[in-house]
Image: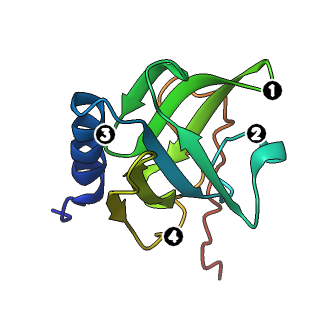
């Protein structure tokens, strides 16, 4: 049995603390091939997203992925962030929160259920005699 990561639990805890403290939760993300965010807002391979209740809809803070819908420049966009790509969650107003080291990207095709992402097939190598 593989060990569960504490990262998604810590992200949810800081998010709840922000909301209960009337603070704005911000999520810092290291963009990788599994991350779906509006690329126009990515700077130096990173993006910071507001997770306030006024900024996003259908927010799900899962163990593998964080998903939501938001508006960027007036256009609606579905956001998919692998939990391993999260490099921080903090309160906009105080800067208090947690920072993380980015993890390796999850294997292709392991996106969230119902994702628009195509399921990539991992090639299988066989020894042929």
Separation of residues labelled 3 and 2 (CA atoms): 22 Å
Separation of residues labelled 2 and 4 (CA atoms): 21 Å
Residue occupied by mark 3:
15
Q: Earlier in the sequence, mark 2 or mark 4?
A: 2
Q: In what quadrant of the picture does the N terminus appear?
A: bottom left
Res. 38 mark: 2
Is 1 placed left or right of 111 in the picture?
left
Graded by Cα atoms within 10 Å as few (under 14), some (14 to 19) or many (20 or more), the crowding at tag 2 reads some
Q: Earlier in the sequence, mark 2 or mark 1?
A: 2
SS at badge 3: helix
Residue occupied by mark 1:
73
Residue situated furthest bottom in the rendering: 129
SS at badge 1: loop
Query: Is label 3 or label 4 in front?
Result: 3
Q: Earlier in the sequence, mark 3 or mark 2?
A: 3
Query: Is label 2 or label 1 in front?
Result: 1
Graded by Cα atoms within 10 Å as few (under 14), some (14 to 19) or many (20 or more), the crowding at tag 3 reads many
Graded by Cα atoms within 10 Å as few (under 14), some (14 to 19) or many (20 or more), the crowding at tag 1 reads few
């Amino acid at each position: 049995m593989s060990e569960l990561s504490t990262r998604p639990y810590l992200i949810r805890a800081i998010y709840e603390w922000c909301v209960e403290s009337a603070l704005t939760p911000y999520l810092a993300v290291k963009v990788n091939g599994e991350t779906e965010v509006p690329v126009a807002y990515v700077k130096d391979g990173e993006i910071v997203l507001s997770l306030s209740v006024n900024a996003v809809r259908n927010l799900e803070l899962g163990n593998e992925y964080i998903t939501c819908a938001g508006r960027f420049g007036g256009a609606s966009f579905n956001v998919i962030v692998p939990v391993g790509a999260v490099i921080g969650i903090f309160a906009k107003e105080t800067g208090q929160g947690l920072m993380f080291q980015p993890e390796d990207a999850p294997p292709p095709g392991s996106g969230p259920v119902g994702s628009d992402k195509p399921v990539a097939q991992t090639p299988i190598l066989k020894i042929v005699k």
